[in-house]
Image (spheres, helix red, strand yellow):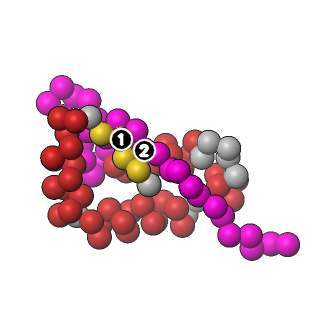
Amino acid sequence: VVLRVRNKNVPRIEAEKEKRANEINEGIGRIVRSAQDRHLREPGLETMTRQLTQYVNEVFGFDQDGMPRVERVIVPRCMGAPMDY
C-alpha cells in the first residue's frame, strides 16, 4: 500500500508511521484478509481502497484545514491466491 500525501503533511505522516508501524501493518492486514473474493476481483479494487482510505484517515487524521492528511491510498499490486480450481 502506498500513501500519497501533501508535502506539508509528510513529516507528521512519517513520524506517526514510524511510531505506530506494527499497529498500521496489522490494521491493513486485517482489511486485506477480510476482503471478499469479489472485492479482490474488482478491476480498480474500489472496495478495498475505500476501506483502506477510511482506516488511514482514522490513523493519521486531518490537518488544520480539515483535509485528510493522506490524499490517496494506492494499491499498486494485489493478487489473490487461487484457492478453488
Label 1: which secondary element:
strand
Q: Disc 1 residue type? A: Arg
**Residue 5 appears in which quarter of the rendering?**
top left
Image quarter where the C terminus lies is bottom right
Queried whether the magenta region covers residue 68, the answer comes back as yes
Q: Is residue 10 left or right of residue 78?
A: left
Q: Which residue is mark 1?
A: 4
Residue 6: percent from left, percent from top = 26, 34
Residue range corresponding to the magenta coloring: 57-85
Relative placement, left or right, of 5 versus 11 is right
Q: Secondary structure at mark 2?
A: strand
**Of marks 1 and 2, which one's residue comes earlier in the chain?**
1
- Whether tag 1 and tag 2 are in contact, CB under 8 A, the answer is yes
Residue at (56% x, 55% y) in the render: 77
The disc placed on residue 73 is 2
Assess disc 2: are there few (<14), some (14-19) or many (≥20) residues with their C-alpha within 10 Å of its C-alpha.
Answer: some
Which secondary structure is most common in the magenta stretch?
loop
> Which residue is rendered at x = 48% and y = 60% of the image?
31
Residue 64 showing in the rendered view: yes
